Image (spheres, rainbow, N blue to C red):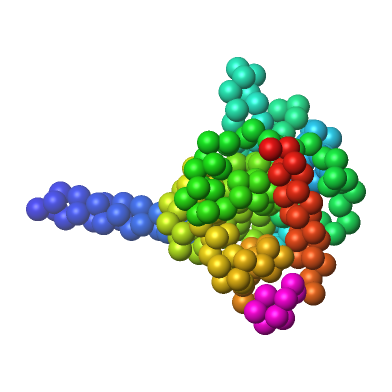
Amino acid sequence: MKFVRRSLSLLLQFSLLSLLLFNAWTMAWAQQPSKEKPRYKASYSKHGILNNSDAPVAVNNTTDDLKVKVYQYTQNNGVMAFSDHAPNAKDFTVLMYDCYACQVDSKLDWQKIPLFSADYDELIGRAAKNHQLDPALIRAVIHAESAFNVFALSRTGAMGLMQLMPETAKAMGVKDPYRPDQNIEGGARYLAKLLARFDGDLDLACAAYNAGPTRVAQYQGIPPYPETQAYVKRVKILLKRYQQAG
């Protein structure tokens, strides 16, 4: 009987000691600083290509940090890859930027920059036919929005070739905005709706595509935003050039 009581006493002491050790370990673990995944901020070049010398540095989670989402680079085996942080590859492309034609201080000569006259020709032709649009207009908008970068993502969340915002993509029936066929079809449908809303006025439709139809209605014309005004002007330049290129 004494042996049983002694055994129970030892077992109780062991249990208490184990509980104390567990609590101490839990408190020590909880006090360790959390190791958050580092975030990156990119340096932008005029050509969109960055070298390792321009590699991003870790920053806090600020609004500027939201500018970078996707890095594109080619692996040693020749396969294209994408990453959410700067890769070790020699060269990589930042796929997130603002509207290509909206940069007021752009040094590009819009009368001479290379055109994308054959890219997605079948998809653009189909969308133009479906929505009774000039294929050159669709091509001009794609060029102005993303420079034909299928994975383009703006800091405001606009996606793909025609830079569709999430709510616009949903309204236009686009499930995957990074699929060229869906993006072009959805963007063309939206552009056609804007032209219809503004009685075929190309300037107002383009301004609405950039700044939103509410702003155009509010100002009863092209909004007094330098970015939007530059955008409309450059889309019209591109439109004329694509029409001439056939």
Residue 79 vertical position relative to residue 116 in the rendered view, above or below = above
Residue 65: quarter of image = bottom right
Residue sitting at x 61%, y 53%: 163
Q: Is residue 38 visible?
A: no
Task: Tell me if 113 is positioned left or right of 188 in this view.
Answer: right
Name the one closer to the observer, 227 or 14. 227
**Farthest residue, direction top:** 77
Q: Nearer the viewer, residue 203 or 9?
A: 203
**In the drawing, does residue 26 fall left or right of residue 128?**
left
Query: Residue drawn 75% across and 30% down?
Result: 91
**How many labels were placed on the picture?**
0
Residue 22 lies in quadrant: bottom left
x then y, percent, for residue 19: 36, 57
Residue at coordinates 85% horizontally, 40% vertically from top-left? 112
Residue nearest the viewer, comparing 85 with 72 = 72
Residue visible at 75% across and 41% down?
Answer: 244
Q: Is residue 105 visible?
A: yes
Residue that protrudes farthest toward the left in the picture: 1
The part of the chain drawn in magenta is: 216-223
| Image x and y of residue 195, in percent | 59, 65
Residue 74, image x and y in percent? 65, 26
Magenta stretch encompasses residue 195? no
Q: Is residue 147 left or right of residue 28?
A: right
Relative image position of residue 21 (x, y in whole percent)? 42, 53
Q: Quadrant of the C terminus?
A: top right
